[in-house]
Image: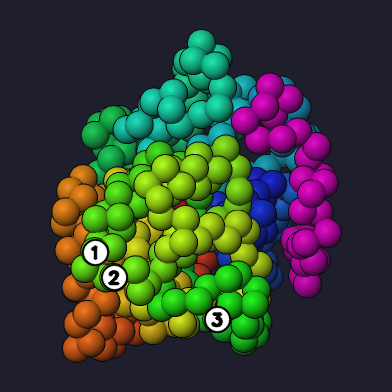
Amino acid sequence: MKIGIDARMYGPQSRGLGRYVQKLVDNLVAIDSINTYYILLSPENWDQFHPKNKNFIKVLIRSHWYSIAEQIFVPIKLWRLKLDLMHFPHFNVPLLYRKKFMVTIHDLIVSHYPDSRATTLPKWLYNLKLMAYRLVVRHAIVNSYKILAVSQFTKQDIERYYPRVADKIEVTYEGFSVEHGKSHRIDLEKEYGITKPYLLHIGAAYPHKNLYRLLQAWKLSQAQLKNNYQLVIAGRKDFFMNRLSQEAINLKLDENVLFLGFVPDEHLASLYQFSIAYVFPSFIEGFGLPAIEAQSYGVPVLAANNSSLPEVLGNSALYFDPFNINDISKTVQKIITDEDLKEKLKNLGYKNYIRFDWQGMAKQVKRVYEYLGK
């Protein structure tokens, strides 16, 4: 079979999507020496992928995702490759591409939160962008030969919006691989100014991540915690993170909330290992990989009791109502003060994260390729 994979998001620069694409492609290289793969890469990540097998062929695509150029030039390139199957690991399937393809849907967050506060664009332009999003997502879901959903929650969400496609959805959980050996210990005080025991959150500051309520809950907890702890938020500084940082200043939390900006992978081990707990307050998540990563470091997880998180974390997390500031605050205080609970969640977390395996995911995806190729 000639299989194409859109890997323009390959690599850590594309956050969770980049990790998914990278692990899928790298593990297919490890398990498949028969099928021929055409791996679509951008100029930004062209040098990051070094295929060891001759059946993996790099294809340069200069059109950026979510662009008009993507809609025009990507289909032309794909038609020339004469593929038997194309896999888009994200919903951005060009509208003009009508040959056999499958798609991975990670979540439908924008469908749930189509709020102009989630963008820096003017409202009229965002509404236009939202219309385009709905059109592209519908095309990807309705015209695909197979839909991979990264959780049962995402599967059910797709069915809710597009009930007629239920029979072609297959759940393929994201994986996880322990890569602690690539990290090294750092001096957290010297590197990041962390001077107190701390709770940790890593990721973007988009509105659905619910970090505003986390700040308010942290403010509510300060009297009981006597300002002896810090909340550490790591994530690339952009409009949303800067706005959140300003909110912390408005709440007079400057001393006890630290915004680290982007943290390189080699620093994550120390950041995770020395934290009291990882806090995941999102309103909605398609899978929730950072919580699994935290568990691999022996870090207790506090999580919102909604979307995919109870499915992925099971009994290994301490849950709270993400809409209730008091509940978030009480949960934070509980994990800080209850040593037995921390030890229990640490042990349950170890048992939970080993359920997820990137190579197992790649094998499942390969079976879908071969099924569709018959």
- Residue at 22% x, 80% y: name it: 337
- Residue 290 position in % (x across, y down): 44, 65
Q: CA distance from mark 2 to mark 3?
A: 25 Å
Report which quarter residue 242 is drawn in. Answer: top right
Can residue 251 be seen here? The reply is yes
* Contact? badges 2 and 3 (CB < 8 Å): no
N-terminal of the pair, mark 1 or mark 3, is: 1
In the rendering, which numbered label is found on residue 270? 3
Determine the secondary structure under disc 2: loop
- Residue at 58% x, 71% y: name it: 193
Q: Say which amino acid is labelled 3.
A: Ser
373 or 74: nearer the eye?
74
* Contact? badges 1 and 2 (CB < 8 Å): yes
In the rendering, which numbered label is found on residue 226? 2
* Contact? badges 1 and 3 (CB < 8 Å): no
- Residue 46 position in % (x across, y down): 81, 54
N-terminal of the pair, mark 2 or mark 3, is: 2
Q: Say which amino acid is labelled 2.
A: Lys
50 or 307: nearer the eye?
307
Determine the secondary structure under disc 1: helix
By secondary structure, the bulk of the magenta-drawn segment is best described as loop
61 drawn magenta: yes
44 or 27: nearer the eye?
44
Q: Say which amino acid is labelled 1.
A: Ala
Left or right relative to 202: residue 97: right
- 10 Å neighbourhood of mark 2: few (<14), some, or many (≥20)? few
**Which residue corresponds to mark 1?**
223
Determine the secondary structure under disc 3: helix
342 drawn magenta: no
Q: Which residues are magenta?
A: 42-70
- Residue at 58% x, 78% y: name it: 188
- Residue 246 position in % (x across, y down): 49, 42
